[in-house]
Image (spheres, grey):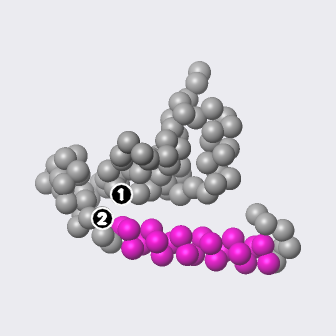
Amino acid sequence: MAVPSLAYPFGYWSGRVREAAAAVGHAQAAAVGNAAAGPGDDVLAVPRLTVRRATAPAAFAQIARCQGLDRLYRRDRVLTAGYAVVRRSRRTLRTLRTGRRV
């Protein structure tokens, strides 16, 4: 059975992971973005909107209408950017330690 879509675990991906998703036949994939998808988005990195157990019904209604996303996701975007720095730093340290790019 074909699985056309993929949600990257925790929404994080790299070029290597994106290529692997395409190689196994995924036609589209969702990534962390906390933004509304648009017609020009990469189909293997479509931004997804995070909805948590604690998301209030009023906030969910705003998310569903794509209203006020900048305000609703400001904190998430800062955390996502910070964690990207952590991931890149870890990858660089592994590369330095092993002598090969991982």
In this view, the residue farthest toward the front is 40
Expressed as whole percent of the image width and height from the top left, the position of residue 94 reads 75, 73
| Majority secondary structure of magenta residues | helix
95 above or below 37? below
Q: Residues within 10 Å of mark 2 (few under 14, many from 20)?
A: some
* Magenta span of residues: 76-96
Labels 2 and 1 touching (C-beta < 8 A): yes
The outermost residue toward the top is 1
Q: Distance between the residues labelled 2 and 1?
A: 6 Å
Q: Mark 2 points at which residue?
A: 73
Residue 71 placement: quadrant: bottom left
Residue 2 image point, x, y percent: 58, 24
Query: Please, which residue is most extreme toward the left here?
Result: 58
- Is residue 92 highlighted in magenta? yes
What element does badge 2 sit on?
A: loop
Quarter of the C terminus within the rendering = bottom right
- Residue at the spot x=51%, y=72% of the render? 83
Disc ID at residue 10:
none
What number is the disc on residue 34? 1
User: Quick check: can you spot residue 7?
Assistant: no
Would you say 88 lies left or right of 31 here? right
